[in-house]
Amino acid sequence: MNLQRTVTLWENPRPSSTRFCRPIKFMYMKETTESIRKEVVKVRDEVAKLNPYEIHINDKLVPINFVLHLTMVDGKVINALTESSSQSCHICKCKPPSKH
């Protein structure tokens, strides 16, 4: 009987902190909605192409899968990806109350 189970070995405790997150690359170009979206598509494609890593532990093959999330993004990137403004919540699209 071959039972497989998934065990999380490490999960970033602070995904919005620079302690464990590092830049993927630096680009010297104007940051536009189009350039942001193109770069996000490239990054997501690269993540989708990641292959599991396999190691041997005590004569057993242990596969390691990677799950990556886009967490270190600023307001301009969120606005470009969600087609919202910084005056509204990027999750639910709520806006601040008007000052009438």
Image (tube, rainbow, N blue to C red):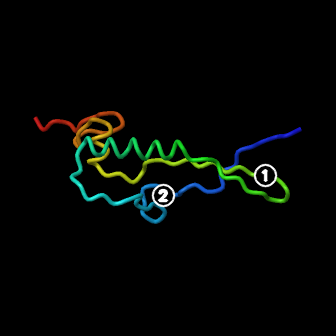
Up the image or down, 44 lies above or below 11; here it is above
Q: Residue at x 35, y 46 (%)?
A: 39
Q: Residues within 10 Å of mark 1 (few under 14, many from 20)?
A: few
Q: Residues within 10 Å of mark 2 (few under 14, many from 20)?
A: few
Q: Nearer the viewer, residue 98 or 19?
A: 19
Up the image or down, 48 lies above or below 61; here it is above
Q: Nearer the viewer, residue 81 or 13?
A: 81
**Where residue 52 sits in the image (x, y, percent)?**
64, 48
Residue with the mark numbered 1: 61
Q: Residue at x 15, y 36 (%)?
A: 98
Q: Is residue 22 left or right of residue 1?
A: left
In the rendered structure, which amino acid carries the disc numbered 1? Leu
**Where residue 70 sits in the image (x, y, percent)?**
43, 48
Earlier-in-chain disc, 2 versus 1: 2
In the rendered structure, which amino acid carries the disc numbered 2? Arg
**Quadrant occupied by the C terminus:** top left
**Where residue 42 sits in the image (x, y, percent)?**
41, 44
In this view, the residue farthest toward the bottom is: 19
Residue with the mark numbered 2: 14
Q: Secondary structure at mark 2?
A: loop
Q: Residue at x 50, y 46 (%)?
A: 47
In this view, the residue farthest toward the right is: 1
